[in-house]
Image (spheres, rainbow, N blue to C red):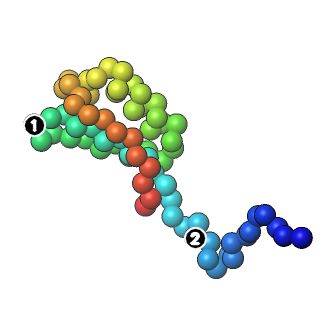
Amino acid sequence: MKTTNKLKSALLDNDTTTKAYQVKIDLGNGRWAELNFSEKVWAQAEYNRIKVSSIYCDNWVKTITLEEIEQ
């Protein structure tokens, strides 16, 4: 009988990397902002709030992105 789930060795498994969530905002004319969050729900909420309003720090938002990064 063949098993379908293979377990990684404790030596090969790398759980030391932490994930962060980054909201990048391009305000045009070389101006930008980056917001870093430890929780995905916080980053998603802030991304949605800024995207809907299209304004950040009294400036129009040119583009906005949400990315998952490893630290």
Q: Secondary structure at mark 1?
A: loop
Residue 34 relative to residue 70: left or right: left
Q: Which residue is mark 1?
A: 29
Quarter of image, res 61 = top left
The residue sitting at the bottom extreme is 11
Q: Which residue is mark 2?
A: 14
Quadrant (top left/top right/bottom left/bottom right) for the C terminus: bottom left
The residue sitting at the right extreme is 1
Residue type of the residue flagged with mark 1: Asn
Quarter of image, res 11 = bottom right
Q: Secondary structure at mark 2?
A: loop
Residue type of the residue flagged with mark 2: Asn
Instruction: Please tell me which residue is depicted at 20% across the width and 40% down the height of the picture.
Output: 32
Instruction: Please tell me which residue is depicted at 69% across the width and 72% down the height of the picture.
Output: 8
Q: Earlier in the sequence, mark 1 or mark 2?
A: 2
Instruction: Please tell me which residue is depicted at 51% across the width and 42% down the height of the picture.
Output: 40
In this rendering, is residue 47 above or below 55? below
Percent x, y of residue 24: 31, 42
Percent x, y of residue 52: 36, 21
Q: Is residue 57 visible?
A: no
Of the pair 54 and 38, the residue shown nearer to us: 54
Instruction: Please tell me which residue is depicted at 26% across the width and 23% down the height of the picture.
Output: 55
Residue 33 relative to residue 50: left or right: left
